[in-house]
Amino acid sequence: MRILSHEIPSAVGQTVTVAGWVHRRRRLAAVSFLILRDRSGLSQIVVKGSQEQLDELSEETVVQVTGTVAANPQAPGGAEIVDPVIEPLTEPAATPPIELWRPTVGAGLPVVLDNAPVALRHPVVRAGWEIAAAALHGFREALSGQDFTEIQTPKIVGTATESGANVFALDYFGGPAYLAQSPQFYKQQMVGVFERVFEVGPVFRAEPHDTVRHLAEYVSLDAEFGFITDHRDVLVMLRSAVAGMLQAVGERAGGALERLGVELPEIPVDVPVLHFSEALKIAGADPDEPDLAPADERAIGEWALREHGSDFVAVEGYPMVKRPFYTHPQPSDPRWSNSFDLLFRGVELVTGGQRLHRYSDYVAALAARGESADAPAYSSYLQAFKHGMPPHGGFAIGLERFVARLTGAENVREVTLFPRDLHRLTP
C-alpha cells in the first residue's frame, strides 16, 4: 500500500511504497539521491551502485518506489528510503518550462500563467490555491455552523443582475441570455425559503478592466439571511465568516503560509466602522465624490492600521446613487445607503448591506429609474416579495482578492488557477 512522504518518518525500519514525481536527482561519488514529490511534500530515496536507471528518470517522471525506511537527521522529516526498487509509471518526462526543483520561481508571471498546468506543480505557485481551498472550507464551516443552507443558482440567466457592469451575452437556443454577474436575485429569493443561505460559485464580469485586481471570472462567496435589523447585523455575520476563513487557513494551509512567508492577520471582534462622508475626509478626497478611488481605499486602510491596529475597516453609508436599486436607504437620510464595503489592507474585499424587502419599495425604486416592476427582467425576481419577505441582507467576498491581500500578491492572477481577463482565455 502506498504511503505519503509525510508518513515516512513514522515508518522507520519498515518496508514501504511511495509514488510521485521525480523532483530532483543529486549525484555524489558513491551514492545518489532521488527526491520524490507527492501531494504531502518531499521524500529522499538513496540510490547506490549503478546510476543508469537514475540517469533515465528525468525530472517530473512519475515513479513508484519500494524500499526500507532508515533514520537520517539530514533527510526531509529525518528519514529516507534505502535499498529502493524504482518502477517508472510513465515514459521519461519532457523538461518542464520552469525549474520546479528550485525553492523560488525564477520565471515571470506571463510564463507561469502560459504554462499553468505544469507551473502549478511548484510548491510556491500552488501555495496560493492551497490557501484558497482552506479559506473555502472555513467559509462553509462558519456559515453552516450558524444554520445556513448552501445553495447553487443558475449561471445562465435571462437578464443582467448588477447595474453598471457589462455582461457576457450568449445565444441560448436562438434567444438572448447572459452569464450571471452574481447570484444576487436568487439568493434573496431563497431567504424566503431557507432564511439563511450561502453560495460558492463563479461569477462573470465583462467590464474592460486590465488591472492587477480585476478578473473576468472569479469565485464569489455569497451569503444572504433574513430577520435582520439593519446592515450592521450583516457586518457582524461577515466578520464571523472572515474569522472562520482565517482560522481554517491557519489550520489547513500552514505549509503554504510558511512557503510564502505569510503571517495570518486577525480580524477584530469589533471591526472599525467609518461613515462614507468621514472616509472621504480621512482620504483627503472631494466631499462630493460618490465613490472611493483606490488611493482613497489605501489611505483609509493606513488609517485603520495606525489608529486601530486593524488590517480591516468597514465603510458604511455609500451614496444611494452608487448602489444597486435593491439596496435599502438609510432611514434617517435616504441620500445614504444601509450598505458597506469591507476593506482589507487598503483594498475593497467585500460589498454588503441591507436589501429592500417590501414589494411596494421595489416598485418605487424601479419607477425612480424609469423602469417597471412588471418588466420581464424583474417580474420573476419580485415574485418572492409579493408573497412576504423578511428584512434581510447579505454580502459577497471575492475569493481570489482575499487570497491576494492575505499573501501580499501584487497581482490577483498570481493566486488564480487559470485566470480569465481581457487577454487570457487559455490554458
Image: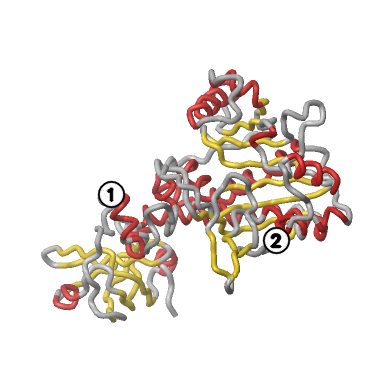
Where is residue 35 drawn, in percent x and y? Answer: 28, 65
Label 1's element? loop
Residue where numbered disc 2 is placed = 150
Q: Does residue 164 appear left or right of residue 187 in this picture?
A: left
Tell me which residue sits at (58%, 55%) in the image: 136
Q: Circle 1: is it few (<14), some (14-19), or many (20+) Cα within 10 Å?
A: few
Answer with the quarter of the image where residue 316 lies. top right
**Viewer-nearest residue: 225 or 296:** 296
Please state if 171 lies on the left or on the right of 152 as rendered. Answer: left
- For image coordinates 30% across by 65% down, the residue present is 44
- Measuring from the top left, give residue 101's x and y in whole percent: 27, 58
| Relative to 427, residue 410 above or below | above
Residue indicated by mark 1: 108
Q: CA distance from mark 2 to mark 1?
A: 38 Å
Q: Nearer the viewer, residue 412 or 13?
A: 412
In the structure shown, which secondary structural element does the residue marked by tag 2 occupy?
strand
Badge 2: residue crowd in 10 Å (few <14, some 14–19, many ≥20) = some
Residue 230 visible? The answer is: yes
Q: Residue at x 67, y 28 (%)?
A: 273
Does residue 30 lie above or below 226 as drawn? Answer: below
Pointer 2 or 1: first along the chain: 1
Indicate the quadrant containing the C terminus: top left, top right, bottom left or bottom right: bottom left
Residue drawn at (86%, 54%), measured in percent from left and top?
386
Q: Position of residue 403 (x, y in %)?
A: 49, 47
**Residue 147 in view (yes/no):** no
* Mark 1: amino acid: Gly
* Outermost left residue: 29
Residue 392: numbered disc: none
Say which amino acid is labelled 2.
Glu
Position in image of residue 138 (x %, y %): 61, 53
For residue 198, which quarter of the picture?
bottom right
> In the displayed structure, would residue 141 be above or below residue 50?
above
